[in-house]
Image (cartoon, rainbow, N blue to C red):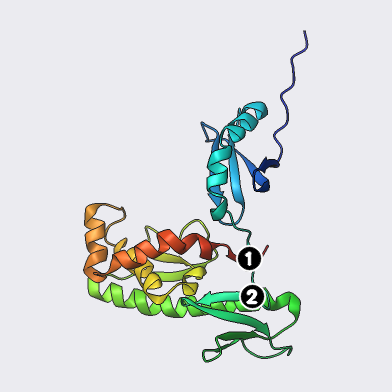
Amino acid sequence: MMLKRRAAIPEKLQIDLATGALEIVVSQNARAKHYRLSLHPKKGVVLTVPKRGNWRDAQNFVHRHHDWLSDRLDQIQSPAILAPGMALPLRGEPHHLMSTGNLRGLVAQDTCNQQIAVPGAPEHFARKLGDWLKAEARRDLSIQVAAHAERLSLSPKGITIRDQTSRWGSCSSSGQLNFSWRLVLAPPFVLDYVAAHEVAHLREMNHSPRFWRTVKETLPDMKRGHDWLKVHGRDLMRYQIHR
């Protein structure tokens, strides 16, 4: 008797919604126990399939969640690769990205006209601008981290600026603070909140009531930045330096 072979799990699935076709990225996870749909800043909609999952069951799971997907279509945004002509927020203010047309020079911000001029060959535009944004983020975060560390009498080991899209910041057990460069796109009070949040983790490596009291101790108006990120954070995560 021949056993029926299971259908192979593809890398992508396309379904039709009332508003049009939607492509879903399929990810098999050995640790997953259930089928799951989630929104990823870079990948868009992701279907997680358990290692022993059945493709027919996975498809049925997706179709049962058509309404869930339709309700969240406004949150599913295509990645925005940094390019000339794009409007990019910088410290909460929209700026027009433009190429200088010169091969040499430095990235320059024109605050009066709200423009950011980037030199170099077209294929290096995103990388050059990305390096500049990371440096700006490091400068702003270094100032705010130092201020909160002094208030709380804490000493971070150092600051790392990353291209992470799953979180705005993190604190390692060694005291290293890590931040997403995209924080420089948000209003300054938002970056200040994340800086305070991660510095507070140097005292409390959890999210207990004591931790939140620590954040409030150094930043009494912490709720303002926290609430802004909940509403607008996903919009900033779509900006990318690389495809």
Residue at x 65%, y 45% (from the top left corner): 25
Q: Decide which of 174, 72 is in the foreground and name it.
A: 72
Instruction: Report whether 222 appears left or right of 239.
Output: left
Q: Callout 2, which amino acid?
A: Met
Instruction: Report whether 212 appears left or right of 108.
Output: left
Q: Callout 1, which amino acid?
A: Ala
Q: Position of residue 36 (x, y in %)?
A: 54, 37
Q: Decide which of 194, 175 is in the foreground and name it.
A: 194
Circle 1 SS class? strand
Q: Is residue 118 above or below residue 70?
A: below
Instruction: Report whether 206 appears left or right of 40.
Output: left
Residue at x 51%, y 70% (from the top left corner): 181
Question: Which residue is denoted by mark 1 in the rendering?
Answer: 80
Q: Position of residue 140 (x, y in %)?
A: 42, 79
Question: Which residue is denoted by mark 2 in the rendering?
Answer: 86
Q: Decide which of 57, 216 is in the foreground and name it.
A: 57
